[in-house]
Image (cartoon, coloured by chain):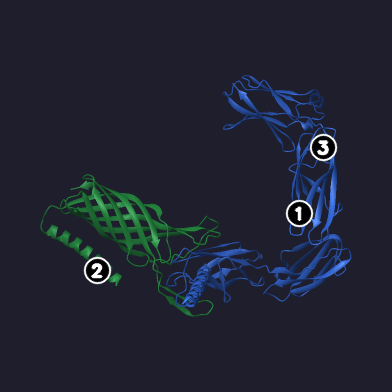
Amino acid sequence: MKKSTSYLSLVILILVLTSSNCLANYYSITINGVQYYNGQTVYIDCTLSGEIAFRTDRTPIDNSNIPGARYWSTTGNYSVRSALGTPSGGGSEAFFYLQLSTDGSDGSINIQFWEGNTAITVYVTRKPTLTLNSTPTLCSSGQSGDHSATLNFSGPTQSNIKWQTTGGLTVNGSSSYTEYNNTNSQVSIQHNSFGTYSVWAEIPGCNNLQTSPITRYVGVPSGNDITFTRTGGSDPGFALCSGQTFNFQSSIALPASQYSYNWSIPQGSNSVSYFQSYGPNATVGTGSAGGGFVLQMNITNLACNTVGSTSRTFGIQNCGGYFRVAENPTSNTLLALFESTDDTKYLPHTLRLMHEKAGVVKEVKIRGKYSNEDAKTGLQVGMDVYTLPKDIYYLQGLYDDGQIQSVRVIVQ
Amino acid sequence: MINKRMKKLIFLTLFSALTLSSWKVSAQSKITYGLGVKGGMNLSRLIEKNANNKYLLSYLTGVSLEQLFSSRVSLSYALLYSRQGDITVFSNPGLFNRSRTRYNYLVLPIELRYRLKYYPFYITPGFQAGYLLYKRGDFLPKNGSTTYSLDQEEKIDVGLSLGLGCRFSKHFFGEAKYYQSIKTILKPFSAIDPVSGAIVHRTPPDVRNQTLSLSLSYYFLVR
């Protein structure tokens, strides 16, 4: 009795799973005899042009009860027209012609069906895709391995697969190699030092339509191959202003599946007020003027467990240019007192007074109005506020590197 | 079977209306006519198999003629511009998560208004015929144009209605009404498969209009 109950439960479970799967794939469109369900991609030979016919369907196919389309639309350079035409006797639409794109671009067909809350999107592409089948790990210098690629392609027989390398890699002893008139290609890639190889396909019969290239990194980069630069502003070079925060990022975005980053400050950590890193990004806060530090980025090739590194040395100087507000609260004039600085480029280019609701209520241009000599002695910039309503405002200095210094002020 | 029953009901409604009208006229009794305007809001949707379509809020407006036979019985005829349709929320949202259908009909409802004995309310059973003037469909959120065939729907939609009305004064009559088509609004399907060349016939899906309307009539000519 127990056994039969178990069998029954199993049968019910299978039925439920099967039926839910059928429901999920219920509606479809049929192109060239193949059913495509929601979210699937149909590859259409890029040598074809004009229109191809398709029809709406469901699983299981029932020719006496073809599901009708309520609405349809396309994206990309595709269009769909009803095959019924006029006069047709009308009725719910089920037969269509797809006007193919002429530029090989991607698109989609979207159809909403009658009798249900179902709409499906089937993606259309004229571009075949290339897959890398064999990618042996190359860790030591001089090591080589056979790599192969296959074109997922159901179109013209003429297609070329192209390989190209950069840095210390070669493909079949050269920096590039082309496999003509084939949908498969096998090459030998040799690793001498860090570099990349890329592979893509080109179809001469479709105006040399190219597939999206696949690029892989091999080896581990050193200081000659990779560095890091500032983000969120121009790179400062050697000199960093004191009391500021700088974001740095690796110059090459290496894939996290192959490489890991490790940032450190091997020298001068006393001159750093803040340090944090995450993947290819690091943030450093500079301490007092006169100090300096070394920022180092280590990269580990996870498959080979080999490490490469690159570093930069920075000095810290007093750039000045920041301000404080005298007479706060005030009812007449806000006075911004600037630190002395050697160059007006360290001053904000604009001072503006902001109100939380009203936005910018006053603005004063600083750049061009003062000389370096004025900046050295310490500038004083006034802003009349006696006409403004009594409230809380923010006096903001806008700097060239995108920073904003904001001071809360009260007008009373 | 249902269609036969519906036909019988339509026939009975029309028959009662005509009988009442002719009997009153022949009896030379006092028949009062009211000519007025009518307007209100529509909550409409399409009733489909396996679908739970959402209501579309729109409006109806037009002219109405009332033929009062007594203080309790009257017939109402109207010619209305009625905006209908529905919102379909997709069970598998992708590029789009819903669609909006808009049908604009010219409708001719004929209602019997019968006042309940002890209440100030009228029950208003009726028949309605509509002529499809305009159709539009949109995938939402909008992304390019949505296309559809203007040949899918029948031009004529017929159905039955039942409402509850209230005469606020000599001039004003308010009503809440439910309407439903008595047959599918879609045409039969018949076409040649462009791939196989086979002729394909099928009965149309059962899709019907359903409206819930709140309207107010103002009769400015009463005699």
Q: Percent from the top left, x then y, of residue B114? A: 20, 55
The amino acid type, in three-letter code, at marker 3 is: Asn
The amino acid type, in three-letter code, at marker 1 is: Ala
**Chain with blue colouring:** A
Q: Percent from the top left, x then y, of residue A119? A: 51, 64
Labels 1 and 2 share a subunit: no
Q: Percent from the top left, x then y, of residue A62? A: 47, 77
Residue at 35 percent across and 55 percent down: it is B82
**Which SS class for mark 1?**
loop
**Residue hosting label 3:** A270
Q: Is residue A278 above or below residue A206?
A: above
Q: Which residue occupies the foreground of this view, A411 or A362?
A: A411
**Residue hosting label 2:** B8
From the viewer's perspective, tell me whether residue A268 is left or right of residue B133.
Answer: right
**Which SS class for mark 2?**
helix
Q: Is residue A60 visible?
A: no
Q: Which residue occupies the foreground of this view, A185 or A312?
A: A312
Q: Residue furthest front?
A: A1
**Residue hosting label 1:** A253
Q: Is residue A356 above or below residue A216?
A: above
Give the mark nearest the N terminus, 3 or 1: 1
Q: Is residue A386 above or below residue B79?
A: above
User: The numbered mark 3 sits on a residue in which chain?
Assistant: A
